[in-house]
Amino acid sequence: MSERGSGKSRKSPASKALASKQPAPKAAAPKKAAAVGRKASGAPSGKSKAPAKRAAAASPASVLDPPALLARVVKLESERDRLLAELEKAESRIRALEEGRDQVLSRIDWVIDSLKSLIESEQ
C-alpha cells in the first residue's frame, strides 16, 4: 500500500505545529514598513482618527443638546409604537392559532368518542 493512500502524512505532528505557527514573513514585512514610513513622515494613521470621532460623538455638549434629545425621544417613541403594534399583531395571531388548535382537539375528541360508541354498539 502506498503512503499516499494511507492517510498518513510524512511530517511529524511536531513539525506540522511548527509550520503552522510560523508567520508568512513576506506578507508581514511590507505592512510593517509602510506603517513605519507613515509614522516617520508625520502623516496621521487611520487608527488615531477613530478615537477622536468617538470622543466627539460622546462629548457632553452633544449628549445634552435639546434638539438632539428631542429627536432621539421621537425616534424611540416611534420604535416603541411600532414594536407595540407588532406585539399586538403577534398576540392576535397566537390567539387565532390557539382557537384553531382547540377546535381541532375537540373534533379529534368527538371522533374518538364516536368510534368508541360504534365499537361498543357492535359488541
Image: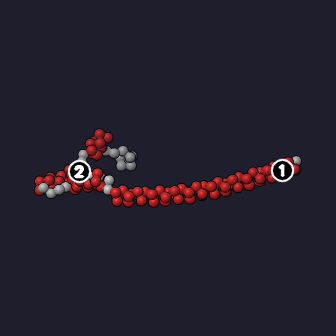
**Residue located beneath label 1 in the image:** 117
Q: Quadrant of residue 66?
A: bottom left
Q: What x and y, as percent, mark residue 45? A: 19, 55
Q: Which residue is drawn at 75% across and 51% down?
A: 109
**Mark 1 surroundings: few (<14), some (14-19) or many (≥20) residues within 10 A:** few
Amino acid under label 1?
Answer: Ser
Is 47 positioned to the left or the right of 104 in the image?
left
Q: Under tag 2, what secondary structure?
A: loop
Amino acid under label 2?
Answer: Ala
Report whether residue 26 is seen: no
Q: Under tag 1, what secondary structure?
A: helix
Q: What x and y, as percent, mark residue 22? A: 24, 46
Q: In which quarter of the image is residue 88?
A: bottom right
Name the colouring of the figure.
secondary structure
Is 10 positioned to the left or the right of 102 in the image?
left
Q: In which quarter of the image is residue 96?
A: bottom right
Between 26 and 6, which is closer to the camera in this rendering?
26
Q: Residue 24 carries which label?
A: 2
Q: Which residue is drawn at 88% across and 47% down?
A: 123
Between 94 and 39, which is closer to the camera in this rendering?
94
Report whether residue 87 is seen: yes
Q: Which residue is drawn at 17% across and 56% down?
A: 44
Relative to 22, is 84 above or below? below
